Image (spheres, grey):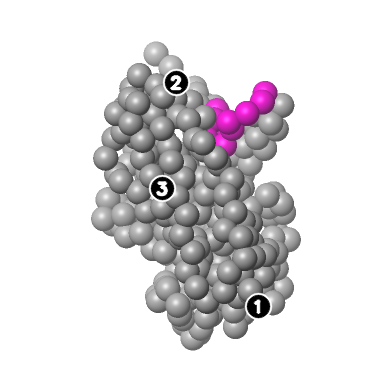
């Protein structure tokens, strides 16, 4: 029989491989880079700053010290579109789901380093995000840990000792979400990809042209199941809250099609370039769709 150490080592190696597979849909060189990054960070202890303070909807609050079985830690800096990176509605859905399955065993820690505090508070109020967030005004959290520059790897699942057991953003990648949920529920990670099929899309890149920025715009992508198995769409993620997608949740039979209705509502005038990721049981998953245009 294997020792407990050997079992833990095997599980750690399997999780590393599984995380790498979650991110890779292309060549071996990229897979190697991701695997090396995951191996480097898996098992590291995350250090927390002493001077960060918490707020709820922009108002200072007090956080009770707690040490649950698991922690999901999210680091967000001021680079890029904060609303796009956050996807707060998805975090609220995930937190509700986790709480229903593992009540009291998992805490969510959101650390922010941003000079645009008012903008962030507006986003929290817009989504009624009534959970505490940590303001790290001196960016101590980053200085203590030197997180990877890629935002894909700035979210972590920690154990009770604050050591990383999984890395990746579960609201940006359904496979990472499945991994987090499996670990929290004590299930083993699996490398199985299940039943696969093939998908054909006439166009993956559509332009909305120029339009009044206050007018909602909608366009359709048609996915045709050209394989021999049912096509199942597991999730559809957008690069920004300003883009939403509607589609049938029913499995698509071979030779049938499903329409993805993409709606864009500009937050301000300007050119835009948005990505939609379709996670499904196709060989090409995730399928990347793109909409562009100019809101005037």
Q: From the top left corner, tell me how far across and down residue 156 is, in percent.
A: 54, 50
Residue 94 higher or lower than 23, as above or below: below
Residue 72's spot in the image, x, y percent? Answer: 47, 54
Looking at the picture, tell me which residue is in the foreground, 213 or 32.
Answer: 213
Q: CA distance from mark 3 to mark 2?
A: 50 Å
Which of 283/172 is in front?
Answer: 283
* Circle 1: element type: loop
Location of the C terminus (image quadrant): bottom right
Q: CA distance from mark 1 to mark 2?
A: 51 Å
Binning the other alpha carbons within 10 Å of mark 2 as few (below 14), some (14 to 19) or many (20 upward) gives few
Q: Is residue 257 magenta?
A: no
The rendered magenta stretch, by its main secondary structure, is classed as helix
Q: Residue at x 40, y 76 (%)?
A: 128
Region of the chain picked out in magenta, as a range: 16-28
The residue identified by callout 3 is 260
Task: Check disc 3 and report its element: helix, strand or loop.
Answer: strand
Q: Quadrant of the N terminus?
A: top left
Residue 91 visible in the picture: no
Q: Can you identify the residue that label 1 sits on?
A: 116
Q: Position of residue 213 (x, y in %)?
A: 57, 74
Q: Which residue is mark 2?
A: 3
């Amino acid at each position: 029989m294997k020792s407990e150490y050997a079992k833990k080592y095997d599980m750690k190696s399997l999780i590393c491989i599984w995380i790498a597979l979650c991110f890779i849909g292309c060549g071996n060189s990229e897979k190697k880079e991701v695997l090396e990054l995951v191996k480097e960070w898996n098992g590291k202890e995350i250090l927390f700053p002493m001077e960060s303070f918490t707020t709820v909807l922009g108002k200072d609050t007090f956080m009770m010290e707690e040490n649950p079985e698991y922690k999901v830690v999210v680091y967000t800096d001021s680079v890029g579109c904060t609303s796009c990176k956050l996807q707060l509605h998805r975090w609220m859905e995930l937190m509700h789901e986790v709480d229903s399955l593992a009540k009291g065993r998992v805490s969510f820690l959101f650390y922010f380093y941003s000079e645009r505090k008012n903008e962030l508070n507006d986003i929290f109020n817009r989504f009624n995000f009534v959970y505490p967030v940590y303001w790290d005004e001196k960016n101590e959290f980053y200085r203590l840990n030197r997180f990877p520059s890629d935002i894909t790897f700035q979210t972590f699942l920690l154990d009770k000792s604050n050591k990383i057991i999984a890395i990746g953003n579960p609201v940006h990648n359904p496979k990472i979400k499945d991994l987090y949920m499996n670990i929290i529920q004590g299930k083993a990670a699996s490398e199985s990809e299940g039943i696969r099929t093939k998908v054909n899309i006439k166009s993956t890149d559509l332009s909305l042209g120029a339009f009044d920025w206050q007018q909602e715009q909608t366009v359709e992508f048609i996915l045709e199941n050209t394989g021999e198995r049912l096509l199942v769409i597991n999730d559809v993620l957008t690069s920004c809250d300003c883009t939403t997608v509607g589609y049938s949740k029913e499995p698509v039979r071979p030779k049938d099609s499903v329409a993805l209705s993409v709606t864009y509502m500009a937050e301000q005038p300007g050119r835009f370039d948005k990505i939609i990721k379709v996670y499904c049981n196709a060989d090409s998953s995730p399928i990347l769709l793109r909409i562009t245009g100019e809101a005037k």
